């Protein structure tokens, strides 16, 4: 790892960069109206543990109908740190699902900026009107924050489906963020957190 890469990672570990704009349990807590009110026009989704289990080959059954609906409401695409083979597997998953979904090709991993830039180019949106939705603080959230996107942290769908070194990294980044938040730096949700639930409560329970 060269010095500039190490410096970039260390910068990403700063709790300010790990702090998401919004934190929800899963994407079903997000409402289209809520996102539109915030000026969001494009969504960028992570895959593993955000919409599938780790290396899963099907959308998680709990969130699948809602994901399909949300992806139809907003311009959407996928960025993942997976290998080219895994990206192809994800494309095949969407094809099987009958879902037209662009999976960004990049040999550069999140939190580095190339995949975020490519996602913005595909969506045709600017960072401030684009939300990055993912389960990892050091990759999805830090990278999205550095790209100037609105960042939405979801809880991992199946945390024990991932390799142990991922669980250790997750524990480390979560420790850093929680310590930061305990010092009074709340999640940067622009609206009172219960606003999310108020909107949720007013929506038809069709998902
Ligand atoms: Mg993930």
Image: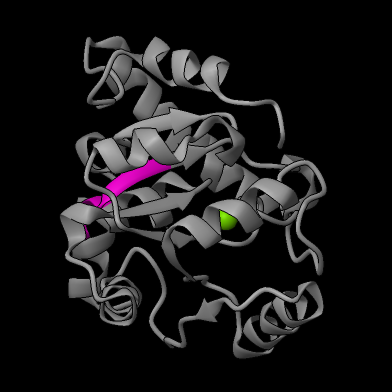
Q: Identify the image quadrant of residue 156.
A: top right
Q: Is residue 148 visible?
A: no
Residue occupying the point 53% across, 17% down: 202
Q: Position of residue 131 (x, y in %)?
A: 34, 52
Image check: 157 left or right of 185? right
Q: Position of residue 65 (x, y in %)?
A: 73, 50
Q: Position of residue 188 (x, y in %)?
A: 25, 27
Q: Identify the image quadrant of residue 182.
A: top left
In the rendered image, the residue lying farthest to the front is 204
Image check: 171 left or right of 21? right
Q: Position of residue 68 (x, y in %)?
A: 65, 58
The number of numbered discs placed on residues in the rendered structure image is: 0
Q: Which quarter of the rendered picture does the C terminus lie within?
A: top right
**Is residue 154 shown above or below 187?**
below
Q: Which residues are magenta?
A: 145-152
Image check: 70 left or right of 146? right
Q: Is residue 75 visible?
A: yes
**Is residue 122 shown above or below 147?**
below
């Amino acid at each position: 790892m060269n010095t500039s890469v190490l410096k970039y990672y260390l910068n990403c570990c700063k709790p300010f960069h790990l702090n998401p704009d919004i934190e929800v349990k899963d994407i079903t807590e997000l409402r289209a109206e809520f996102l539109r009110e915030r000026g969001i026009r494009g969504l960028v989704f992570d895959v593993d543990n955000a919409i599938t289990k780790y290396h899963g080959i099907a959308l998680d059954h709990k969130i699948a109908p809602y994901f399909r609906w949300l992806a139809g409401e907003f311009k959407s695409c996928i960025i993942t740190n997976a290998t080219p083979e895994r990206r192809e597997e994800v494309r095949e998953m969407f094809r099987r699902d009958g879902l037209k979904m662009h999976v960004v090709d990049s040999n550069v991993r999140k939190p580095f900026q190339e995949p975020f830039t490519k996602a913005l180019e595909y969506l045709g949106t600017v960072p401030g009107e684009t939300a990055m939705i993912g389960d990892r603080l050091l990759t999805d959230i830090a990278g999205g924050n550095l790209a100037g996107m609105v960042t939405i942290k979801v809880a991992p769908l199946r945390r024990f489906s991932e390799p142990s070194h991922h669980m250790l990294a997750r524990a480390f980044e979560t420790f850093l963020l929680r310590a930061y938040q305990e010092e009074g730096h709340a999640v940067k949700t622009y609206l009172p957190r219960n606003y999310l639930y108020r909107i949720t409560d007013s929506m038809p329970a069709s998902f």
